[in-house]
Image: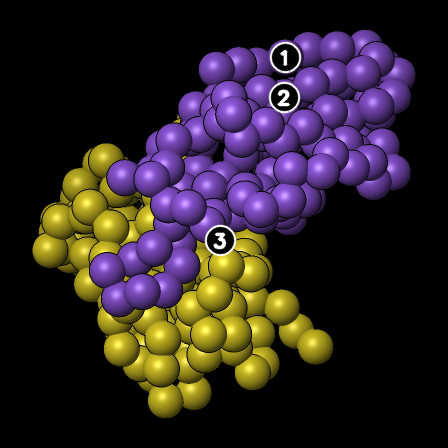
Amino acid sequence: AQKVTQAQTEISVVEKEDVTLDCVYETRDTTYYLFWYKQPPSGELVFLIRRNSFDEQNEISGRYSWNFQKSTSSFNFTITASQVVDSAVYFCALSGKTQGGSEKLVFGKGMKLTVNP
Amino acid sequence: DAGVTQSPTHLIKTRGQHVTLRCSPISGHKSVSWYQQVLGQGPQFIFQYYEKEERGRGNFPDRFSARQFPNYSSELNVNALLLGDSALYLCASSSEGGIWQYFGPGTRLTVT
């Protein structure tokens, strides 16, 4: 079975600080995907990034960057120069198979980020 | 194109009642998944339907059921509501039950 652990439950930073969100996962699948989602107070899950298990290249996209390390089963996410609008709950998720062979997402418990002006 | 839509937005029910939540996927998508998000937790997978057939079921009691219609919209039904069923119910659509899942705004259910 798949499992996602987000050890941090809540982080508070001041605007313009960099913040890294940690994610550790467990899976027996050889091929899988990892995701980060943002959930603002409105409740809708907003897709941020996706990475597949074959691609450990770390990238930067605007103020977002991620560090995928298969050897330690970690998929950390960094927001550079945080802004008040980044305040939200952030979820790390892992793909898994349903009994019928389709895909489902397994989420961590989430980490609440508060960016103060 | 419209995204995933869910109705109603909010709902208040009493213990023991039954509830039906509705979801319309993105046009062209044939798969719908349902997730339950209890306050302070991450979403948990409940069901997935593809082409009107159940493709997966999470660890939820038989009080939870779902179906998918010929137009690919879906209903989630919960019988004999418990206080613990209070949650945000999220629907996600994908083209063929794949990993690109697009989430709707959710239905917030409160059971009193």
Q: Which of marks 2 and 1 is nearer the N terminus?
A: 1
Label 3 residue SS = loop
Question: Where residue B106 is drawn, which disc sits there?
Answer: 3
Q: Closer to the camera, A13 or A31?
A: A31
Q: Nearer the viewer, mark 3 or mark 1?
A: 1
Q: Nearer the viewer, residue B82 or A28?
A: A28
Determine the colour of chain A: purple
- State which chain disc 3 sits on: B
Q: Which residue is drawn at 36% across and 89% down?
A: B70
Callout 2, which amino acid?
Leu
Spatial CA distance of label 3 from label 2 is 25 Å
Kindly identify which residue carries mark 1.
A11
Q: Do the residues labelled 3 and 1 touch (CB within 8 Å)?
A: no
Horizontal placement of A101 versus A39: left or right?
A: left
Query: Relative to B55, is A108 above or below?
Result: above
- Tag 2 subunit: A
Does the residue at mark 2 contact the one at mark 1 (Cβ under 8 Å)? yes
Q: Which amino acid does label 1 sit on?
A: Ile
Q: Quadrant of residue A84?
A: top right
Q: Which residue is drawn at 52% across and 74% down?
A: B95
Direction from residue A84 to residue A4 in the image, left or right:
left
Looking at the rendered structure, the kind of residue marked 3 is Gly
Query: Which quarter of the rendered picture does the C terminus of chain B lie within?
Result: top left
Chain B drawn in what color?
yellow
- Residue A44 in percent (x, y) is at 58, 48
Residue A67 in percent (x, y) is at 68, 28
Q: Which chain carries label 1?
A: A
Across and down, in percent, residue A33 comes to 52, 47
Element on which disc 2 rests: strand
Check disc 2 and report the residue beneath it. Answer: A21
